[in-house]
Image (cartoon, rainbow, N blue to C red):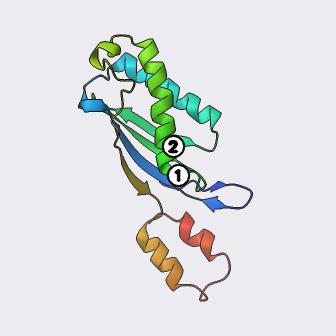
């Protein structure tokens, strides 16, 4: 994503709900290689095609986890999106890469139950400045404050 934030719109909301997600593999097993990552990345893009209000800005991996910078609409709980991603990627991965059945025998999932999430958004100083300046500038202040780089 560029330095300028991308506001998204629905019929009744304008929002910037970007998150950094880290999804570790079950037992932190080092399963990701280039081929598995390429397949997983393809599955992530398919999820975004099916749910067009989800948007992945960046995605990458290490051997035992993946990182996503993702935009999630305010109507969708983050935990539900994490579950959606884990369910839809795990099913395809275990079918496409049967050797993982040996690593995770007796277990349907490849993902740990846990995850890390952090918001990515407008800088706190920008919000403070916006609130402080209420009533002191013209009505275009929202666009001016939030569209500038801080």
Seen from this angle, which residue lies furthest top?
Answer: 98
- Between 104 and 132, the one nearer to me in the picture: 104
Q: Secondary structure at mark 1?
A: loop
Q: Is residue 139 above or below residue 150?
A: below
Q: Can you give x and y, in whole percent of width and height, for residue 134 in the image?
A: 58, 85
Q: Which mark is residue 77?
A: 1
- Is 47 positioned to the left or the right of 108 in the image? right
- Between 36 and 96, the one nearer to me in the picture: 96
Image point (67%, 61%), residue name: 13
Q: Is residue 102 above or below residue 51?
A: above
* Circle 2 residue: 81
Q: Can you give x and y, in whole percent of width and height, for residue 84 in the image?
A: 51, 37
Q: Residues within 10 Å of mark 1 (few under 14, many from 20)?
A: few
Seen from this angle, which residue lies furthest bottom?
Answer: 136
- On the image, which quarter does residue 101 sit in? top left
Image point (38%, 16%), residue name: 35
- On the image, which quarter does residue 144 sit in? bottom right
- Is 99 positioned to the left or the right of 135 in the image? left
Q: Is residue 116 above or below residue 145?
A: above
Q: Residues within 10 Å of mark 2 (few under 14, many from 20)?
A: few
Image point (65%, 61%), residue name: 14
Q: Is residue 143 above or below residue 1?
A: below
- On the image, which quarter does residue 31 sit in? top left
Asked if marks 2 and 1 touch (Cβ < 8 Å), the reply is yes
Q: Can you give x and y, in whole percent of width and height, for residue 56 in the image?
A: 51, 40
Q: Which mark is residue 115?
A: none
- Determine if residue 1 is in view: no
Image point (38%, 19%), residue name: 36
Seen from this angle, which residue lies furthest right?
Answer: 11
- Determine if residue 103 is in view: yes
Q: Can you give x and y, in whole percent of width and height, for residue 97 in the image?
A: 39, 13
């Amino acid at each position: 994503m560029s330095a300028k934030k991308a506001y998204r719109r629905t019929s009744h909301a304008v929002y910037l709900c970007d998150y950094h997600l880290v999804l570790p593999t079950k037992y932190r097993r080092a399963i990701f290689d280039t081929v598995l990552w390429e397949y997983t990345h393809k599955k992530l893009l398919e999820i975004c095609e099916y749910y067009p209000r989800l948007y992945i800005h960046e995605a990458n991996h290490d051997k035992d986890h993946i990182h996503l910078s993702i935009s999630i609409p305010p109507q969708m709980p983050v935990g539900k999106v994490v579950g959606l991603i884990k369910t839809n990627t795990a099913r395809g991965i275990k079918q496409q890469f049967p050797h993982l059945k040996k690593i995770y025998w007796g277990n349907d999932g490849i993902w740990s139950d846990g995850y890390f999430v952090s918001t990515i958004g407008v800088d706190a100083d920008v919000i403070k400045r916006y609130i402080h300046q209420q009533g002191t500038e013209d009505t275009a202040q929202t666009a001016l404050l939030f569209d500038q780089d801080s």
